[in-house]
Image: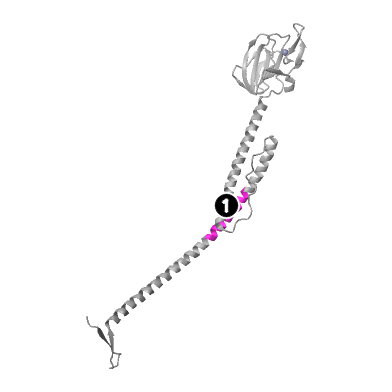
Amino acid sequence: MSAKKYTVLMIPEGSHQVRRFAVRRWWLGVASVLGMALLFGAALLVYDYARIRIDHSELKRLRTENHLRLAELRQLTERLEGLRQELIVLAQNDAKVRVMAKLTRPKADALTGLGGPLEEDPAEEFSEVQRRIDEIMRAIDLHRASQEEVHGLLSDERSLLGSKPRGWPTRGLVTSGFGMRRSPFSGRPVMHEGIDIAARTGTPIYATAGGIVSRAETVAGYGKIVIIDHGYGFQTYYAHNSKIHVKVGQRVKRGEKIAAVGNTGRSTGPHVHYEVRRNKVPLNPKKYI
Ligand SMILES: [Zn+2]
């Protein structure tokens, strides 16, 4: 195969004429290289075409998906807007409650300047949704703190209300009021630090507020006495009893029976000497009935 030229014979079918070509060796080389390149190019084209077809269907799928996601995002935004509206109503109610409770307004209202149409750019739309969620979370935190404050105040008020003496300790007749009076024993003017309610011996005496019994014993002058601590500095005294039904340290409720009317101590007849004190200072019990 070292010849420089080759002869190619072509014999057409059914003919006796033979055609012959002289072909140079390097031509054959060039032709085979060209053929190879052509084949390779064709293969590349087919491959590219297939890839474009695949990419195209992928693109279609992605477009549909993107539309779906966008629709979902818009729905989410609408729901967020609904949530925000509800929060605004809650904030208004909260403000009313705070006014009623005489509390200061919350320092800032995170819900102002929120909302409006969404951006066209989906990326911005997404960050906008994120921002709104953050803002709603902040508003919720703010209102939670406010609610806790109101709740604390209300429960304080309730326990203060429960601590304030209210009503009569027993049924009877007020025979002596609060204030300066002539002593029934010495005849000299003395301070009467409570009121006297006359009733038959054995008539039940009730606590006028919830609290803890701090004294239940016999004391000179007062006789058999019960003292109840109610908290917030309030104390009530029930003196001259015939019987005591409670013990020191016992927790009692408003209206609970604690003693019976008697005539013990410095007393001129069966009655309850009833005192209301706040921070040890005697107050007019009539103001707490
Ligand atoms: Zn008295």
Looking at the rendering, which quadrant does residue 269 occupy? top right
Q: Residue at x 29, y 79 (%)?
A: 29
Residue 151 x, y percent position in the rendering: 63, 34
Secondary structure of the magenta portion, mostly?
helix
Image height of 198 relative to 109, above or below: above
- The quadrant the C terminus occupies is top right
Q: Which residues are magenta?
A: 66-83
Residue 191 makes an appearance in the image: yes
Task: Examine the structure image and report whether residue 79 is included in the region drawn in magenta.
Answer: yes
Q: Residue at x 62, y 14 (%)?
A: 216
Image height of 11 relative to 252, above or below: below
Q: Check disc 1 and give the amino acid type.
A: Val
Tell me, what colour scheme is on the image? Answer: one colour
Residue identified by numbered label 1: 129
Residue 112 x, y percent position in the rendering: 65, 47
Task: Examine the structure image and report whether residue 174 is included in the region drawn in magenta.
Answer: no
Please name whichever residue, 8 or 71, is drawn nearer the observer in this view of the structure.
Answer: 8
Q: Residue furthest bottom?
A: 16
Instruction: Tell whether 128 sits left or right of 260.
Output: left
Q: Residue at x 34, y 78 (%)?
A: 34
Residue 154 x, y percent position in the rendering: 65, 32
Callout 1: few (<14), some (14-19), or many (20+) C-alpha neighbours within 10 Å? many
- The quadrant the N terminus occupies is bottom left
Residue 61 x, y percent position in the rendering: 49, 63
